[in-house]
Image (cartoon, helix red, strand yellow):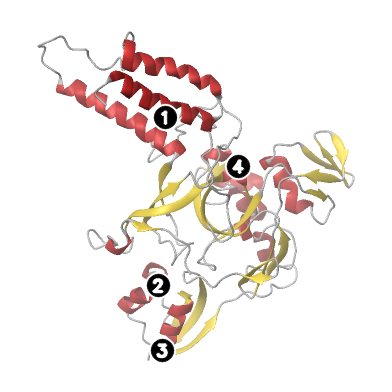
């Protein structure tokens, strides 16, 4: 590798392979830069680094600056095309993925997206830390394009994606679903009380992680809390948990015992009036352990199998109409597939309105019971993208596709691959470090 021609050949081959993968052959002009760096050395490409004369004392500050700039460029390249760090912000995936887990997201599995907003601050996603100020430049957008990956999103995969409803954010409630507030409080009141609003492009909405329970073309139903896809029941993964009402003899369960069972003690509220826990989130294994405790009198599930007629709770669930569905008796629902055509009518337009208007960037109007797409009257629509249905493993404490609908392929970021660090928010340092989860490979639970 000390030979300049060997070094040039090595980096030139890697660069050509990257250009072929990128699919934009104008980038082959960059070979001239690589040739000059290793062979001719006419241009001072790393202009910030001083060129020393023979015998001249080297500047440690300049050497550090050169190292930092190289690291920023290298890590940014890795983040865009290969891996990116992500933190689990909520308990919607417990006990599979824990609140406080720091993940490396593998972008090669499904193929990385070519940056739609290439001018952006390194190591930041959508805002500067501690503020709501955008850390990317608008006006230089590129169309969605995904490079070839090793596989497609499969049923039951853990998937990291951009929040579909995150294109509009309330500045005073940035973690809330803007559209849910509008449905229940009205647009004017919501924006006046919790605004002003902030708009974000699809690739700059917040990152979520869920389990993909249904892929494009599937038919999904939730019956008594159990997921069925194409008529078959989903596998009983160990990490899936539900909410239960636990009545005790008047004494609370020892927090250490709850923690050993796998309960997030920060969410285990004991009601002395019951006495017991109105909502304890338990896996199947944890449920049996709780039932065996001496001070537990009874355990009952908190399944929602029906809402009263005309209930507003129904409007919390996608497609936000009076379907009669609940979080635990949901569907049946067909997941849109690229190239498939559906007939539009008043019964199903609520399912597809956001797809047509927002995700696939059309102008949809309804006049006199008829539909107009981009000014043309039509009674059908052909989908441009594949869609997915995501659910959290913590089924009764997860805002997921039951509450905001389909996830388009354009929003898919990647697959969580490694937990490189993990902390328990209910404990203080250093006892909050979950040593048993460090550098743990993320796999589908059996």
Q: Label 2 vs label 3: CA separation?
A: 15 Å
**Could you say which is closer to the camera, residue 259 or residue 297?**
259
| The quadrant where residue 323 appears | bottom right
Instruction: Look at 31% across and 28% down and name the residue there.
Output: 70
Q: Which residue is mark 1?
A: 14
**How far apart are the two marked residues, 3 and 1, measured between alpha carbons?**
60 Å
Name the residue that disc number 4 marks.
410
Q: Position of residue 376 (x, y in %)?
A: 86, 35
> Which mark is first along the chain, 3 or 4?
3
The 10 Å Cα crowd at callout 4, few under 14, some 14 to 19, many 20 or more, is: many
Q: Would residue 158 be found to the left or right of residue 381 on screen?
A: left
What is the spatial separation of the Cα atoms under label 4 and label 1, in whole angstroms? Answer: 28 Å
Res. 90 visible in picture:
yes
Q: Secondary structure at mark 3?
A: loop
Measure how far apart labels 4 and 2 are at the Cα level.
35 Å
Image spot of residue 22 (x, y percent): 53, 31
Query: Residue 171 location in percent, x, y?
Result: 50, 42
Q: Which residue is mark 3?
A: 292
The x, y position of residue 235, in whole percent, is: 56, 71
* SS for dot 2: loop
Circle 4 or circle 3, nearest the eye: 4
Q: Earlier in the sequence, mark 4 or mark 1?
A: 1
Number of numbered discs visible in the structure rendering: 4
Pointer 2: what residue?
Answer: 263
Asked if the residues shown at circle 3 and circle 1 are in contact, with their CB atoms under 8 angstroms apart, the answer is no
- In the picture, measured across the screen, residue 203 lies left or right of residue 1, that is right
Image check: 351 left or right of 53?
right
Res. 169 image quadrant: top right
Contact, mark 2 vs mark 3 (Cβ under 8 Å): no
């Amino acid at each position: 590798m000390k030979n300049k021609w060997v070094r040039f050949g090595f980096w030139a081959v890697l660069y050509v392979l990257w250009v072929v993968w990128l699919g934009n052959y104008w980038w082959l002009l960059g070979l001239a830069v690589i040739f000059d760096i290793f062979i001719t050395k006419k241009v001072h490409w790393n202009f910030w680094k001083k060129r020393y004369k023979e015998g001249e004392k080297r500047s440690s500050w300049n050497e550090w600056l050169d190292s930092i700039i190289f690291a920023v460029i290298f890590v940014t390249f890795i983040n865009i095309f290969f891996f990116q760090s992500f933190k689990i912000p909520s308990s919607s995936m417990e006990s599979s993925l824990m609140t406080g887990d720091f993940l490396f997201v593998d972008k090669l599995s499904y193929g990385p997206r070519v940056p739609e907003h290439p001018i952006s601050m390194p190591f930041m996603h959508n805002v500067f830390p501690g503020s709501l100020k955008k850390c990317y430049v608008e006006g230089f957008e590129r169309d969605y394009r995904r490079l070839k990956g090793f596989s497609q999103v499969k049923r039951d995969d853990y998937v990291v994606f951009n929040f579909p409803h995150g294109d509009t954010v309330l500045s005073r409630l940035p973690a809330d679903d803007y559209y849910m507030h509008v449905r229940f409080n009205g647009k004017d009141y919501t924006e006046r009380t919790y605004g002003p609003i902030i708009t974000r492009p699809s690739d700059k909405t917040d990152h979520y992680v869920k389990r993909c329970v249904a892929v494009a073309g599937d038919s999904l139903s939730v019956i008594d809390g159990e997921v069925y896809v194409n008529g078959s029941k989903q596998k009983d993964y160990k990490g899936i948990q539900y909410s239960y009402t636990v009545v005790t003899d008047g004494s609370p369960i020892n927090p250490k015992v709850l923690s050993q069972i796998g309960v997030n003690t920060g969410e285990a509220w004991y009601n002395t009036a019951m006495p017991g826990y109105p909502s304890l989130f338990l896996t199947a294994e944890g449920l049996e352990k709780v039932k065996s405790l001496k001070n537990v009198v009874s355990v009952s599930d908190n399944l929602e199998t029906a809402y009263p007629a005309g209930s507003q709770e129904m409007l919390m669930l996608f497609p936000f109409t009076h379907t009669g569905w609940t979080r635990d008796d949901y569907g049946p629902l067909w997941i849109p597939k690229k190239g498939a055509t559906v007939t539009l009518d008043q019964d199903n337009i609520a399912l597809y309105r956001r797809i047509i208007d927002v995700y696939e960037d059309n102008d949809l109007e309804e006049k006199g019971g008829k539909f107009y797409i981009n000014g043309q009257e039509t009674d059908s629509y052909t989908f441009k993208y594949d869609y997915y249905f995501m659910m959290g493993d913590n089924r009764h404490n997860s805002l997921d596709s039951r509450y905001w609908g389909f996830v388009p392929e354009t929003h898919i970021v990647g697959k969580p691959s490694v937990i490189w660090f993990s902390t328990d928010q209910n404990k203080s340092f250093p006892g909050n470090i979950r040593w048993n989860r460090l550098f743990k490979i993320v796999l589908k639970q059996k």
